[in-house]
């Protein structure tokens, strides 16, 4: 977004990073309802040779190159500032937030934490 304008069609809930509350879980998920999590911006399966073998989930073999939240393109996965977002392969994409712990991951964490709790 530049000067309040975006190249994407509106309405569009922007956002490629988030702290969120889990509201529903699918089978096999290691998360529970009500849990607070950090959502990774890139989308990956967490089990292919690129995700595990190379340690590069941003090049996942099961999703198109550049698959990410917050980019309304032909590979629409949704934007993380929306009210609800489905997270494919949540076990590979979510990180639980541990209460009373310090997270040294730069300005993205406090910004999204404040947004989620305000």
Image (cartoon, rainbow, N blue to C red):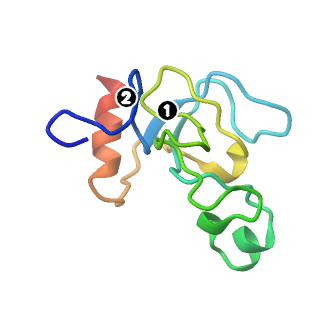
Residue sitting at x 85%, y 33%: 27
Estimate the x, y position of residue 101 in percent, counting from the top left: 41, 50
Mark 2 → mark 1, Cα distance in angstroms:
7 Å
Q: Is residue 64 above or below residue 84?
A: below
**Residue 50 occupies quadrant:** bottom right
Q: Secondary structure at mark 1?
A: strand
Estimate the x, y position of residue 60 in percent, counting from the top left: 69, 64
Q: Is residue 50 above or below residue 34?
A: below
Estimate the x, y position of residue 93 in percent, counting from the top left: 62, 50
What quarter of the picture does the N terminus occupy?
top left
Badge 2, how many Cα within 10 Å: few under 14, some, many 20+?
A: some
**Outermost residue, left side:** 3
Residue sitting at x 75%, y 65%: 61
**Residue 58 occupies quadrant:** bottom right
Which residue is denoted by mark 2 in the rendering?
Answer: 116
Q: Which mark is residue 93?
A: none
Residue situated in front as seen by the camera: 112 or 51: 51
């Amino acid at each position: 977004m530049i000067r309040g304008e975006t190249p994407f069609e509106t309405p569009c809930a922007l956002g490629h990073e988030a702290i969120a509350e889990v509201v529903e879980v699918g089978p096999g998920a290691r998360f529970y309802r009500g849990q607070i999590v950090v959502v990774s911006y890139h989308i990956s399966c967490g089990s292919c040779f690129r995700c595990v073998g190379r340690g590069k989930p941003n090049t996942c073999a099961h999703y198109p190159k550049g698959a990410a939240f917050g980019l309304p393109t032909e590979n629409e996965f949704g934007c993380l500032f929306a009210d609800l977002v489905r997270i494919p392969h949540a076990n590979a994409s979510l990180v639980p937030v541990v209460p009373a712990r310090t997270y040294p991951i730069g300005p993205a964490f406090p910004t999204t934490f404040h947004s989620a709790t305000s």
